[in-house]
Amino acid sequence: MAKKLVIKVTAGADAPERCSQAFTVAAVAAASGVEVSLWLTGESAWFALPGRAAEFELPHAAPLPDLLDSVLAAGQVTLCTQCAARREITEKDVIEGVRIAGAQVFVQEAMADGTQALVY
């Protein structure tokens, strides 16, 4: 099993099943003791803002706020720098515990020994 799992989610409400899958895998991995780093990019960037995950709905899926909370409690959630800038999101806007970082940090995490990376 990988020591660390880096998940990059590019989908939001525009592709709800892909979005939900990414958050579900991240939450299950975190609950299983895997070190998780969840990257919010593209339309998923909006979920870094307070209350936005609660607006997401997908039948037969776990509530997105619960999944996000579990990843925040046991792992790292990162908002892409460029995605944040395009949406005029700053560090003062995001949920406590969410950091903003760029591609260099993503590559460092994804290339670390014992890491598995997934993109949704």
Image (spheres, helix red, strand yellow):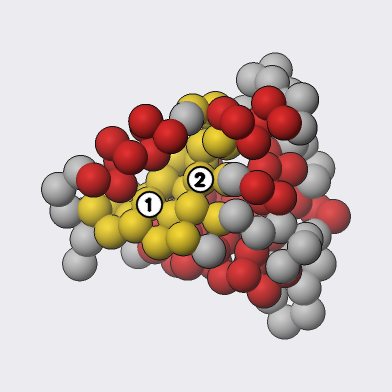
- As drawn, 107 above or below 105: below
Identify the residue at image location x=72%, y=31%: 86
Mark 1 lies on residue:
6
- As drawn, 11 above or below 48: below
Q: Residue furthest bottom?
A: 60
Question: Which image quarter is the N terminus in?
Answer: bottom left
Mark 2, other Cα within 10 Å: few <14 / some 14–19 / many ≥20: many
Q: Of marks 2 and 1, which one's residue comes earlier in the chain?
A: 1
- As drawn, 118 above or below 17: above
Q: Amino acid at mark 2?
A: Trp
- As drawn, 6 above or below 106: below
Mark 2 to mark 1: distance in Å?
A: 8 Å
Identify the residue at image location x=64%, y=36%: 83
Mark 2 lies on residue:
39
Mark 1, other Cα within 10 Å: few <14 / some 14–19 / many ≥20: many
Question: Does residue 10 appear to the left or right of 6 in the view shown?
Answer: right
Question: Does residue 79 appear to the left or right of 34 in the view shown?
Answer: right
For this rendering, which residue is in front, 20 or 54? 20
Q: Residue furthest top?
A: 92
> Label 1 near label 2: C-beta < 8 Å?
yes
Q: Amino acid at mark 1?
A: Val
- Residue 64 at x, y percent in the picture: 69, 59
Look at the image and tell me whether residue 98 can be seen: no
Look at the image and tell me whether residue 103 can be seen: yes
Identify the residue at image location x=47%, y=30%: 102
- Residue 99 at x, y percent in the picture: 53, 28
Question: Does residue 35 appear to the left or right of 115 in the view shown?
Answer: right
- At numbered mark 1, what does the secondary structure look like: helix, strand or loop? strand
- At numbered mark 2, what does the secondary structure look like: helix, strand or loop? strand
Identify the residue at image location x=77%, y=63%: 14
